[in-house]
Image (spheres, helix red, strand yellow):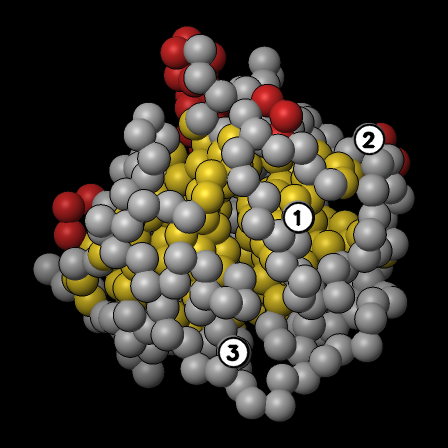
Amino acid sequence: MIDERIARAFAALSFVAAMSACSGGGSSPPHTQGTPTPAPSGATPTPSVSATPQAPSLVAVGSVQSHTVTLFPPTANGTVTPVLLTLPGGSIAPYAVAFDAAGDLYVGVLSPPSIVEYAPGATAASTPLRTITGGATEISLPNGVALDGAGNLYVSNAGSAAITVYAPGANGDVAPIRTISGGATDIGISTNVLQSIAVDSAGTIYAALATDLRGGGIAVFAPGASGNAVPETTLVGTATGLDGPIAIALDSNRNLYAINSNSDTVIVFAAGATGDATPLRTFSSGAFIDDPAGLAVDGLGNIYVSSQMGGLGGSYSVFPASSSGIGVPTYTVTAAGGVFDQAYGIAVR
Protein backbone atom coordinates (compact mmCIF):
# COMPACT_ATOMS: atom_id res chain seq x y z
CA MET A 1 0.00 0.00 0.00
CA ILE A 2 1.42 3.39 -0.96
CA ASP A 3 2.25 5.71 1.97
CA GLU A 4 -0.77 7.76 3.09
CA ARG A 5 0.58 11.13 1.97
CA ILE A 6 1.52 9.79 -1.44
CA ALA A 7 -1.87 8.08 -1.58
CA ARG A 8 -3.50 11.43 -0.91
CA ALA A 9 -1.59 12.94 -3.80
CA PHE A 10 -2.65 10.14 -6.09
CA ALA A 11 -6.24 10.44 -4.91
CA ALA A 12 -6.11 14.01 -6.20
CA LEU A 13 -4.52 12.83 -9.45
CA SER A 14 -7.13 10.11 -9.90
CA PHE A 15 -9.98 12.52 -9.15
CA VAL A 16 -8.74 14.94 -11.80
CA ALA A 17 -8.23 12.09 -14.28
CA ALA A 18 -11.79 10.92 -13.70
CA MET A 19 -13.14 14.43 -14.20
CA SER A 20 -11.22 14.75 -17.45
CA ALA A 21 -12.46 11.38 -18.68
CA CYS A 22 -16.04 12.32 -17.90
CA SER A 23 -15.73 15.59 -19.79
CA GLY A 24 -13.94 13.98 -22.72
CA GLY A 25 -10.97 16.36 -22.35
CA GLY A 26 -7.27 15.60 -22.56
CA SER A 27 -5.60 12.23 -22.72
CA SER A 28 -6.11 10.94 -19.19
CA PRO A 29 -5.03 7.36 -18.53
CA PRO A 30 -7.51 4.65 -17.56
CA HIS A 31 -5.65 3.92 -14.29
CA THR A 32 -4.95 5.82 -11.08
CA GLN A 33 -3.23 6.26 -8.45
CA GLY A 34 -3.23 34.93 12.38
CA THR A 35 0.10 35.27 10.48
CA PRO A 36 2.57 32.52 11.25
CA THR A 37 6.11 33.41 12.25
CA PRO A 38 9.29 31.36 11.96
CA ALA A 39 10.06 29.01 14.85
CA PRO A 40 12.70 30.25 17.30
CA SER A 41 16.02 30.03 17.15
CA GLY A 42 27.89 6.63 -7.23
CA ALA A 43 29.00 8.04 -10.60
CA THR A 44 27.64 11.16 -12.16
CA PRO A 45 29.25 13.90 -14.25
CA THR A 46 31.82 16.04 -12.46
CA PRO A 47 29.97 18.67 -10.42
CA SER A 48 30.06 22.17 -11.81
CA VAL A 49 30.18 25.14 -9.47
CA SER A 50 28.53 28.41 -10.42
CA ALA A 51 31.16 31.19 -10.46
CA THR A 52 28.59 33.74 -9.30
CA PRO A 53 25.82 32.33 -7.09
CA GLN A 54 22.53 33.89 -8.08
CA ALA A 55 20.20 35.35 -5.48
CA PRO A 56 16.54 34.38 -5.96
CA SER A 57 14.10 36.78 -7.60
CA LEU A 58 10.77 34.90 -7.73
CA VAL A 59 9.00 31.91 -6.16
CA ALA A 60 6.21 29.96 -7.91
CA VAL A 61 3.81 27.47 -6.32
CA GLY A 62 1.23 25.16 -7.93
CA SER A 63 -1.79 24.19 -5.83
CA VAL A 64 -3.94 21.25 -6.95
CA GLN A 65 -7.10 21.72 -4.94
CA SER A 66 -7.37 25.49 -5.33
CA HIS A 67 -6.37 25.30 -9.04
CA THR A 68 -3.93 28.19 -8.69
CA VAL A 69 -0.43 29.10 -9.81
CA THR A 70 0.93 31.76 -7.47
CA LEU A 71 4.01 34.01 -7.63
CA PHE A 72 5.80 35.57 -4.64
CA PRO A 73 8.83 37.80 -4.08
CA PRO A 74 11.75 35.84 -2.57
CA THR A 75 11.55 37.63 0.80
CA ALA A 76 7.79 37.14 1.23
CA ASN A 77 6.89 36.24 4.81
CA GLY A 78 3.69 35.67 6.74
CA THR A 79 0.29 35.97 5.03
CA VAL A 80 0.88 37.40 1.57
CA THR A 81 -1.37 38.22 -1.39
CA PRO A 82 0.36 36.64 -4.41
CA VAL A 83 0.17 37.22 -8.13
CA LEU A 84 -2.29 34.62 -9.50
CA LEU A 85 -1.53 33.44 -13.03
CA THR A 86 -4.44 32.66 -15.35
CA LEU A 87 -4.50 29.10 -16.68
CA PRO A 88 -5.95 28.37 -20.15
CA GLY A 89 -9.71 27.95 -20.17
CA GLY A 90 -10.82 24.59 -18.78
CA SER A 91 -7.46 23.82 -17.13
CA ILE A 92 -7.54 22.70 -13.50
CA ALA A 93 -5.14 21.32 -10.92
CA PRO A 94 -1.67 22.75 -11.62
CA TYR A 95 0.71 20.32 -9.93
CA ALA A 96 4.35 20.89 -10.94
CA VAL A 97 6.32 24.08 -11.67
CA ALA A 98 9.83 24.86 -12.98
CA PHE A 99 11.78 27.83 -14.35
CA ASP A 100 14.20 27.66 -17.27
CA ALA A 101 17.45 29.62 -17.48
CA ALA A 102 15.70 32.53 -19.21
CA GLY A 103 13.04 32.78 -16.50
CA ASP A 104 10.14 31.20 -18.38
CA LEU A 105 7.81 29.32 -16.02
CA TYR A 106 6.53 25.84 -16.94
CA VAL A 107 3.44 24.44 -15.19
CA GLY A 108 2.35 20.79 -15.25
CA VAL A 109 -1.47 20.79 -15.33
CA LEU A 110 -3.35 17.59 -14.52
CA SER A 111 -6.51 18.31 -16.51
CA PRO A 112 -6.40 18.46 -19.43
CA PRO A 113 -2.93 16.88 -19.22
CA SER A 114 -0.65 19.69 -20.37
CA ILE A 115 2.41 21.84 -19.82
CA VAL A 116 1.72 25.58 -19.82
CA GLU A 117 4.61 28.03 -20.36
CA TYR A 118 4.64 31.67 -19.20
CA ALA A 119 7.12 34.41 -20.14
CA PRO A 120 9.26 36.12 -17.50
CA GLY A 121 7.33 38.87 -15.77
CA ALA A 122 3.95 37.19 -16.29
CA THR A 123 1.09 38.76 -14.36
CA ALA A 124 -2.51 37.83 -13.66
CA ALA A 125 -3.54 39.09 -17.10
CA SER A 126 -0.77 37.33 -19.03
CA THR A 127 -1.58 34.82 -21.76
CA PRO A 128 0.66 31.74 -21.76
CA LEU A 129 3.42 31.66 -24.38
CA ARG A 130 2.82 28.02 -25.27
CA THR A 131 0.77 25.02 -24.18
CA ILE A 132 1.83 21.43 -24.87
CA THR A 133 -1.32 19.31 -24.86
CA GLY A 134 -3.06 16.58 -26.83
CA GLY A 135 -2.83 12.86 -27.50
CA ALA A 136 0.48 12.99 -29.38
CA THR A 137 2.24 14.54 -26.38
CA GLU A 138 1.88 11.37 -24.24
CA ILE A 139 1.40 13.60 -21.19
CA SER A 140 -0.49 11.72 -18.48
CA LEU A 141 -0.87 13.17 -14.96
CA PRO A 142 2.28 15.33 -15.10
CA ASN A 143 3.58 15.60 -11.54
CA GLY A 144 7.11 16.78 -12.29
CA VAL A 145 8.76 19.17 -14.78
CA ALA A 146 12.42 20.09 -15.23
CA LEU A 147 14.74 21.59 -17.86
CA ASP A 148 18.33 20.92 -18.89
CA GLY A 149 21.00 23.40 -19.95
CA ALA A 150 19.91 23.20 -23.60
CA GLY A 151 16.30 24.10 -22.80
CA ASN A 152 14.87 20.61 -23.32
CA LEU A 153 11.77 20.02 -21.19
CA TYR A 154 11.38 16.84 -19.10
CA VAL A 155 8.05 15.67 -17.69
CA SER A 156 7.39 12.87 -15.20
CA ASN A 157 4.05 11.25 -16.02
CA ALA A 158 2.52 9.45 -13.06
CA GLY A 159 -0.36 8.15 -15.17
CA SER A 160 1.83 6.26 -17.64
CA ALA A 161 4.98 5.60 -15.57
CA ALA A 162 7.04 7.42 -18.19
CA ILE A 163 9.41 10.36 -18.53
CA THR A 164 8.83 12.35 -21.70
CA VAL A 165 11.23 14.90 -23.20
CA TYR A 166 10.31 17.84 -25.48
CA ALA A 167 12.47 20.06 -27.66
CA PRO A 168 12.89 23.75 -26.79
CA GLY A 169 9.89 25.74 -27.99
CA ALA A 170 7.60 22.70 -28.23
CA ASN A 171 3.97 23.76 -28.57
CA GLY A 172 0.57 22.24 -29.19
CA ASP A 173 -0.08 18.56 -29.84
CA VAL A 174 3.58 17.67 -30.37
CA ALA A 175 5.23 14.29 -29.80
CA PRO A 176 8.12 13.99 -27.36
CA ILE A 177 11.62 13.67 -28.79
CA ARG A 178 12.30 10.88 -26.29
CA THR A 179 10.31 8.72 -23.88
CA ILE A 180 11.78 6.67 -21.01
CA SER A 181 9.51 3.83 -19.93
CA GLY A 182 9.43 0.05 -19.51
CA GLY A 183 10.33 -2.65 -17.03
CA ALA A 184 14.08 -2.02 -17.10
CA THR A 185 13.61 1.60 -15.95
CA ASP A 186 12.38 0.53 -12.45
CA ILE A 187 9.42 2.93 -12.90
CA GLY A 188 5.99 1.41 -12.22
CA ILE A 189 2.32 2.32 -11.88
CA SER A 190 1.38 0.84 -8.49
CA THR A 191 4.85 0.43 -6.96
CA ASN A 192 8.04 2.38 -7.65
CA VAL A 193 5.59 5.16 -8.45
CA LEU A 194 7.15 8.05 -10.37
CA GLN A 195 7.09 11.28 -8.38
CA SER A 196 9.05 14.41 -9.26
CA ILE A 197 12.19 14.67 -11.38
CA ALA A 198 15.30 16.83 -11.50
CA VAL A 199 17.68 17.33 -14.41
CA ASP A 200 21.18 18.78 -14.27
CA SER A 201 22.68 21.05 -16.92
CA ALA A 202 24.25 18.08 -18.73
CA GLY A 203 20.89 16.30 -19.06
CA THR A 204 21.35 13.65 -16.35
CA ILE A 205 17.86 12.74 -15.08
CA TYR A 206 17.03 12.05 -11.43
CA ALA A 207 13.65 10.41 -10.79
CA ALA A 208 12.06 10.02 -7.36
CA LEU A 209 10.32 6.66 -6.96
CA ALA A 210 8.00 5.90 -4.03
CA THR A 211 7.40 2.29 -3.06
CA ASP A 212 5.25 0.64 -0.41
CA LEU A 213 4.72 2.41 2.93
CA ARG A 214 8.45 2.82 3.70
CA GLY A 215 11.53 3.25 1.57
CA GLY A 216 11.65 4.22 -2.04
CA GLY A 217 14.60 5.41 -4.05
CA ILE A 218 16.02 7.69 -6.72
CA ALA A 219 16.86 6.38 -10.18
CA VAL A 220 19.46 8.24 -12.23
CA PHE A 221 19.40 8.07 -16.05
CA ALA A 222 22.27 9.06 -18.31
CA PRO A 223 21.95 12.07 -20.62
CA GLY A 224 20.15 11.00 -23.78
CA ALA A 225 18.51 7.96 -22.13
CA SER A 226 15.53 6.73 -24.13
CA GLY A 227 13.12 3.81 -24.33
CA ASN A 228 13.38 0.94 -21.87
CA ALA A 229 16.58 2.35 -20.36
CA VAL A 230 18.33 0.86 -17.35
CA PRO A 231 19.18 3.51 -14.72
CA GLU A 232 22.82 4.55 -14.76
CA THR A 233 22.82 4.42 -10.95
CA THR A 234 20.27 4.16 -8.15
CA LEU A 235 20.16 5.62 -4.67
CA VAL A 236 18.31 3.20 -2.42
CA GLY A 237 18.69 1.37 0.90
CA THR A 238 18.28 1.70 4.65
CA ALA A 239 21.26 4.01 5.17
CA THR A 240 19.84 6.58 2.74
CA GLY A 241 16.93 7.39 5.03
CA LEU A 242 14.63 7.68 2.00
CA ASP A 243 11.07 7.26 3.22
CA GLY A 244 8.59 7.87 0.42
CA PRO A 245 10.47 10.55 -1.58
CA ILE A 246 7.85 12.76 -3.18
CA ALA A 247 10.04 15.62 -4.44
CA ILE A 248 13.71 16.11 -5.31
CA ALA A 249 15.95 19.02 -6.30
CA LEU A 250 19.58 19.76 -7.20
CA ASP A 251 21.76 22.66 -6.10
CA SER A 252 24.43 24.33 -8.23
CA ASN A 253 27.01 21.74 -7.10
CA ARG A 254 24.67 18.85 -8.00
CA ASN A 255 24.09 17.92 -4.38
CA LEU A 256 20.76 16.09 -4.32
CA TYR A 257 17.88 17.00 -1.99
CA ALA A 258 14.81 14.84 -1.29
CA ILE A 259 11.61 15.26 0.73
CA ASN A 260 10.39 12.25 2.68
CA SER A 261 6.60 12.33 2.57
CA ASN A 262 6.24 9.75 5.33
CA SER A 263 8.59 11.22 7.92
CA ASP A 264 8.30 14.94 7.05
CA THR A 265 12.03 15.35 6.58
CA VAL A 266 14.45 16.80 4.04
CA ILE A 267 17.55 14.74 3.18
CA VAL A 268 20.67 16.07 1.45
CA PHE A 269 23.09 13.79 -0.45
CA ALA A 270 26.50 14.60 -1.85
CA ALA A 271 26.85 14.91 -5.62
CA GLY A 272 27.31 11.47 -7.12
CA ALA A 273 25.85 9.60 -4.12
CA THR A 274 24.74 6.13 -5.14
CA GLY A 275 23.66 2.82 -3.66
CA ASP A 276 22.96 2.73 0.07
CA ALA A 277 24.66 6.08 0.67
CA THR A 278 24.49 7.96 3.95
CA PRO A 279 23.13 11.50 3.56
CA LEU A 280 25.21 14.58 4.35
CA ARG A 281 22.47 15.82 6.63
CA THR A 282 18.75 15.52 7.43
CA PHE A 283 16.36 18.03 8.93
CA SER A 284 12.74 18.35 10.00
CA SER A 285 10.80 21.35 11.27
CA GLY A 286 7.50 20.38 12.89
CA ALA A 287 4.58 22.40 11.53
CA PHE A 288 6.85 24.07 8.99
CA ILE A 289 7.40 20.77 7.15
CA ASP A 290 4.02 19.06 7.51
CA ASP A 291 2.62 16.99 4.63
CA PRO A 292 5.47 18.23 2.41
CA ALA A 293 5.05 17.95 -1.35
CA GLY A 294 7.33 20.41 -3.15
CA LEU A 295 11.05 21.16 -2.96
CA ALA A 296 13.39 23.68 -4.56
CA VAL A 297 16.88 25.08 -3.94
CA ASP A 298 17.94 28.58 -5.02
CA GLY A 299 21.32 29.76 -6.28
CA LEU A 300 22.49 30.55 -2.75
CA GLY A 301 21.56 27.09 -1.48
CA ASN A 302 18.42 28.14 0.45
CA ILE A 303 15.86 25.32 0.61
CA TYR A 304 12.16 25.84 -0.18
CA VAL A 305 9.57 23.32 1.06
CA SER A 306 5.85 23.49 0.28
CA SER A 307 3.35 21.75 2.55
CA GLN A 308 -0.03 20.55 1.32
CA MET A 309 -2.12 21.24 4.42
CA GLY A 310 -0.39 20.59 7.73
CA GLY A 311 -0.47 22.71 10.86
CA LEU A 312 -0.32 25.97 8.90
CA GLY A 313 -3.17 25.20 6.50
CA GLY A 314 -0.99 25.11 3.40
CA SER A 315 2.27 27.01 3.16
CA TYR A 316 5.88 27.08 2.08
CA SER A 317 8.95 27.67 4.24
CA VAL A 318 12.47 28.77 3.31
CA PHE A 319 15.40 27.23 5.20
CA PRO A 320 19.08 28.24 5.27
CA ALA A 321 21.47 26.20 3.16
CA SER A 322 23.16 24.62 6.19
CA SER A 323 19.93 23.40 7.84
CA SER A 324 20.32 20.19 9.83
CA GLY A 325 18.54 18.50 12.72
CA ILE A 326 15.65 20.82 13.55
CA GLY A 327 15.49 23.33 10.72
CA VAL A 328 14.54 26.92 11.56
CA PRO A 329 12.85 28.69 8.62
CA THR A 330 13.98 32.12 7.53
CA TYR A 331 10.54 32.78 6.02
CA THR A 332 7.20 31.01 6.16
CA VAL A 333 4.50 32.06 3.68
CA THR A 334 0.78 31.47 3.67
CA ALA A 335 -1.66 33.13 1.29
CA ALA A 336 -5.06 34.71 1.58
CA GLY A 337 -8.13 33.13 0.03
CA GLY A 338 -7.16 29.47 0.37
CA VAL A 339 -4.86 29.51 -2.68
CA PHE A 340 -2.46 27.08 -0.98
CA ASP A 341 -4.99 24.26 -0.67
CA GLN A 342 -2.85 21.20 -1.50
CA ALA A 343 0.28 23.14 -2.44
CA TYR A 344 2.49 20.71 -4.37
CA GLY A 345 5.10 22.00 -6.78
CA ILE A 346 7.43 24.86 -5.87
CA ALA A 347 10.14 26.49 -7.98
CA VAL A 348 12.51 29.42 -7.49
CA ARG A 349 14.18 31.63 -10.07
Q: Is residue 234 visible?
A: no
Q: Are marks 1 and 2 in contact (CB under 8 Å)?
A: no
| Quadrant the C terminus occupies | bottom left
Residue displayed at 57% across by 29% down: 173
- Say what amino acid the circle numbered 3 marks: Gly
Q: Is residue 164 above or below residue 126?
A: above
Q: Earlier in the sequence, mark 2 or mark 3?
A: 2
Q: Mark 3 or 1 closer to N-term? A: 1
Instruction: Report the side of 78 relative to 23 (left or right).
Output: left
Which residue reaches farthest left? 34
Q: Residues within 10 Å of mark 2 (few under 14, many from 20)?
A: some
Q: Amino acid at mark 1?
A: Ala
Q: Is residue 190 left or right of residue 142?
A: right
Which label number is shown at residue 53?
A: none
Q: Compared to 286, does 132 lie above or below?
A: above
**Residue 154, image x, y percentages:** 64, 48
Q: Earlier in the sequence, mark 1 or mark 2?
A: 1
Q: Are marks 3 and 1 in contact (CB under 8 Å)?
A: no
Q: Percent x, y for residue 66?
A: 27, 38
Instruction: State the image coordinates of residue 246 (x, y, percent, origin top left).
Output: 56, 47
Q: CA distance from mark 2 to mark 3?
A: 35 Å
Q: Is residue 123 above or below residue 282?
A: above
Instruction: Tell me, yes or no, if residue 175 can be seen here.
Output: yes
Residue neighbourhood size for the residue with mark 1, other residues' Cα within 10 Å, grouped as few (<14), some (14–19), many (≥20): some
Q: Residue at x 31, y 57 (%)?
A: 122
Q: Are marks 2 and 3 in contact (CB under 8 Å)?
A: no
**Residue nearer the viewer, 100 or 41:** 100
Residue with the mark numbered 3: 299
Q: Which residue is mark 1?
A: 167
Q: Residue at point 47% right, 39% down?
A: 131
Element on which disc 3 rests: loop
